[in-house]
Image (tube, helix red, strand yellow):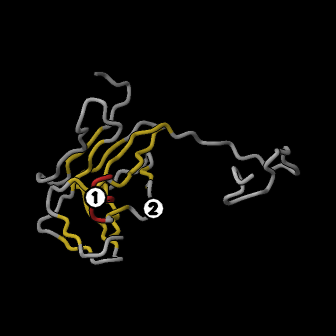
Amino acid sequence: MSSDVQLRVKRLRPSAVLPCAQSALAAGLDLSADLDAPIVIEVGAIALVPCGFAMSLPRGFEGQVRPRSGLATKHGISIPNSPGTIDADYRGEVLVPLINLGRVPFTVEPKMRIAQMVIARAFTAQVLEVQELTDTERGASGFGSTGTH
């Protein structure tokens, strides 16, 4: 399996687990908590969990940080801004905001897989101000307006 996209990763602490795909066809790379001790996320609370590494994405790509399906379905652990975006020019530590939407406090253990990151192309649009927009059948109809007829 080869890739034309290189994700350069710098370990910030020896204990950090680097991003890793869990299967040959996995779309995402698992991100793990780099903690000295467990942390408890109370119901409704948000915790910013460090991953212990920084990275360099190529121009034209982003890292999309998403919840892990098992944590979400079994414990209600999600990401409040899902998917979160890591821009190609960010060089700080990768941090994952976790929110506890479950019914009981949740403990994040050191080295626990807490999220997944999908590397995706990110296009930058040229913004053009215009006086009029082209018409469409949908027009300005918004939330829940399609598929209701």
Observer-nearest of 102 and 134: 102
Q: Is residue 108 above or below residue 55?
A: below
The residue that mark 1 highlights is: 71
Element marked by disc 1? helix
| In the image: residue 14, left or right of residue 59 | left
Q: How many marks?
A: 2
Q: Amino acid at mark 1?
A: Leu
Most extreme residue toward the front is 149
For marks 2 and 1, give the one nearer the viewer: 1
Q: Amino acid at mark 2?
A: Asn
| In the image: residue 9, left or right of residue 60 | left
Q: Is residue 95 above or below residue 90?
A: below
The residue that mark 2 highlights is: 81
Observer-nearest of 6 and 132: 132
The N terminus - image quarter: top left
Question: Decide: marks 2, 1 in contact (CB < 8 A)?
Answer: no
- On the image, the x and y values in percent for residue 74 come to 27, 60
- On the image, the x and y values in percent for residue 13 come to 15, 54
| Mark 2 → mark 1, Cα distance in angstroms | 16 Å
| In the image: residue 123, left or right of residue 143 | left
Among the 4 quarters of the image, the one containing residue 120: top left
Element marked by disc 2? loop
Q: Earlier in the sequence, mark 2 or mark 1?
A: 1
Classify 10 Å Cα crowding around label 1: few (below 14), some (14-19), many (20 and above). Answer: some
Residue at image coords 32%, 64%: 77
| In the image: residue 116, left or right of residue 17 | right
Residue at image coords 45%, 61%: 81
- On the image, the x and y values in percent for residue 62 come to 44, 43
Most extreme residue toward the right is 131
Among the 4 quarters of the image, the one containing residue 126: top right
Most extreme residue toward the top is 1
Disc assigned to residue 103: none
